[in-house]
Amino acid sequence: MTVTYEEVRNKVRDLEFEEEFTIFECGGLEHFVCFSEEVQDSPGEYTPSAEWVTGTEITISGSIRGEFRKPVLLHEVAEFLLRESYTTDDGNPMYRKEDTEAHPIAREWDQRYARETLSERAFREYLEFCNRFD
């Protein structure tokens, strides 16, 4: 399966966050999204194969600005879908891209989404925000 920017963008764009957690489908997998003040070292992080979804659990820092949440979510979903693949018939994981390849693509996509959806000022602030973590 090939993941595209347009597919991830459309899913994230149309998503409405629930108060405690949100589950949505993208790339043929379900993703569990929640917010936590405990995430401090990055804007968000994912854990593959959460028990209650077929895709990943994504935790986004609860302290980031609301308008930055969707670009961060897009980054995490894209990075997971670009890097992780489904398991093979023998149960072994199969990777599409190494993390060193997936992260720059995900960064390009989240910045593209931010440019499309944020004001010019908010976009510059988003870039400054992201640069603190790279």
Image (cartoon, grey):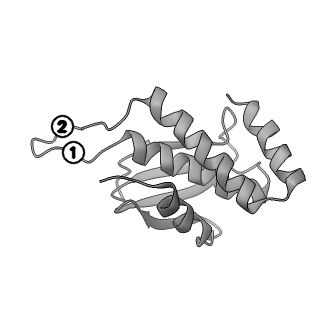
User: How many neighbours does mark 1 have within 10 angstroms: few (below 14), some (14-19), or many (20 or more)?
Assistant: few
Q: Residue at x 39, y 29 (%)?
A: 98
Above/below status of 63 relative to 131: below
Label 1, secondary structure: give it: loop
Marking on residue 87:
1
Residue name at image x 79 percent, y 45 percent: 126
Q: Looking at the rendering, in which quadrant would you find the C terminus?
A: top right
Residue 27 lies left or right of residue 35; in this view the side is left
Identified by mark 2, the residue type is: Asn
Q: Position of residue 37 (x, y in %)?
A: 70, 46
Give residue 92's mark: 2
Vertical relation: 66 (above or below) 47: below
Q: In the image, is 14 to the left or to the right of 61?
A: left
Q: Write the residue at 48% across / 26% down.
A: 100
* Residue 36 appears anywhere in the view: no
Instruction: Kindly indicate whether the residue at mark 1 contacts the one at mark 2 (C-beta within 8 angstroms).
Output: yes
Residue type at the position of mark 1: Thr
The image shows residue 123 at horizontal and vertical percentages of 81, 50
* Above or below: residue 31 compared with residue 83: below
* Sequence-earlier tag: 2 or 1: 1
Q: Which residue is most to the left?
A: 90
